[in-house]
Image (tube, rainbow, N blue to C red):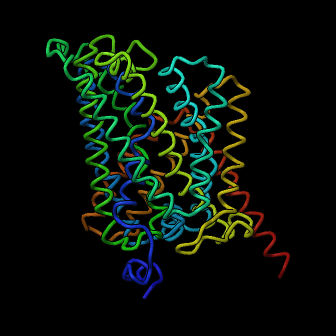
Amino acid sequence: MSSDRLAADTPAASRGGIGLVQGTALYVASVLGTGLLVLPGLTAGVAGPGSILAVVAVLGLSVPLAGVFAVLAARYPDPGGVASYVRRALGATAARMTGYWFLFGVCAGAPVVSVLGAEYVVAALGVDRVVVPLLAAAIFVPPFVLNALGVRVAGSVQFVLTALLLAVVVFVVGLGAPSVDPARLTPFLPHGWAGVATAVSMFVWAFAGWEVGTHISGEFARPRRDIPIATAIALAVTGGCYLILQVVTVGALGARAGEGQVPLLDLARLGSPRLGPIAVGIIAAIVALGVLNAYLAAFAKLGASLADNGDLPRWFSPGVEHGGIPRRALALTGAVTALYFALMVATGLELTPFILVHTSSMVAIYAVGMVAAVRLLPRASPGWWMAVVAAVLCAGMLALAWASLLPALGLAAAAVVVTAVRRVGGRLTR
């Protein structure tokens, strides 16, 4: 029996690991991210009430993508995540590219998350923006500490964070709901279907993150049973949150929804000018902490896996095993994140370049991952058909994102160089 199949089928009592509740909390956190803070207002600005259709559309598009990652993670619980699937299907160089895209490309989004969270907290509390860099830096500390204690501790804390987040979101929606006026839902398509299409492309950011769970799949006690359930629950929870929030945002704020920098704050103030900002500040802090907590667990496990496969110095490999704590790889992630954060502060907290690095790497990972899934999964099985659909969708995403793919191409070139150096080194030692 293969090691991945053995890991998937071994009983929880003998394997140990995170359970369904912890795993679901990590999945929800990886998807229900900073988009919650800004997208409802931004998409309402470009599509009006039609932005509600955009949420439904992207939720539907997310089903095959989330489903494929769930099938792969349950079938091959491996800390390498998507990179390990690509290694099986497309070879070592493609796997190295995929790993570098995630560890060094997607990681550029970490300081974006902390800065967005800090900006929202500052706006909600009415504090001077000069403290944003300090607050953003402080947001990094708890997730790093939690992950240094292990993914099980991080998962347990994540359950509390996710429960608090959902409770406060319900509270904010409750504040704004009495102000909903059906008249604000007309005209339903003020910017036509082109506006809806723009909103769909924006909401892709909101529903990204399904690949994060693949890197912690090996830490599940019962991956074959729990990962599909956790994925389904996370899909329902995140989709429901975005849909309800979008309806209330458009119905309560109308044309004003896309005007402010902090639309969730505007919504909360409708119901309670005093309590609303406090609630939104809490949401911003929890979102930032939760997203970083989930992603750091994935970055660290992937870094250890890449080192174990020789794609990074082997010094970073300790902790790759089930139940291990990859503290050295976590330290590497901290160094990469700190570099991106320093560059961001030096450029006056300009987020766009870092978002482009993040999104271009994410799109590349999805596209290559779906190709690997088509080759790995049994032909004509439900998972295979979902992979085919998702591969077509990812091809469309690549076409839309072609102008921002330069960072991903640079990391791919670095992976090719590593392959060439290793081959030359191998020949010289013969």
Number of labels in the image equals 0
Does residue 430 lie above or below 75 as drawn? Answer: below
Residue displayed at 47% across by 21% down: 124
- Kindly tell me whether residue 61 is visible in this rendering: yes
Residue 148 in picture, x, y percent from top left: 62, 59
Residue 73 in picture, x, y percent from top left: 40, 66
Does residue 16 lie above or below 408 as drawn? Answer: below
Q: In which quadrant of the rendered view does residue 408 lie?
A: top right
Q: Tell me if 43 is positioned left or right of 418 in this view.
A: left
- Kindly tell me whether residue 45 is visible in this rendering: no
Does residue 127 lie above or below 69 as drawn? Answer: above
Q: In which quadrant of the rendered view does residue 329 lie?
A: bottom right
The quadrant of the image that shows the C terminus is bottom right
Residue displayed at 84% across by 79% down: 429
Residue 24 in picture, x, y percent from top left: 36, 57
Name the outermost residue toward the left.
182
Q: In which quadrant of the rendered view does residue 195 lie?
A: top left
Name the outermost residue toward the front.
274
Does residue 27 lie above or below 255 as drawn? Answer: below
Name the outermost residue toward the bottom.
1
Residue displayed at 32% across by 46% down: 62
- In this view, the residue in front, 192 or 260, is 260
The quadrant of the image that shows the N terminus is bottom left
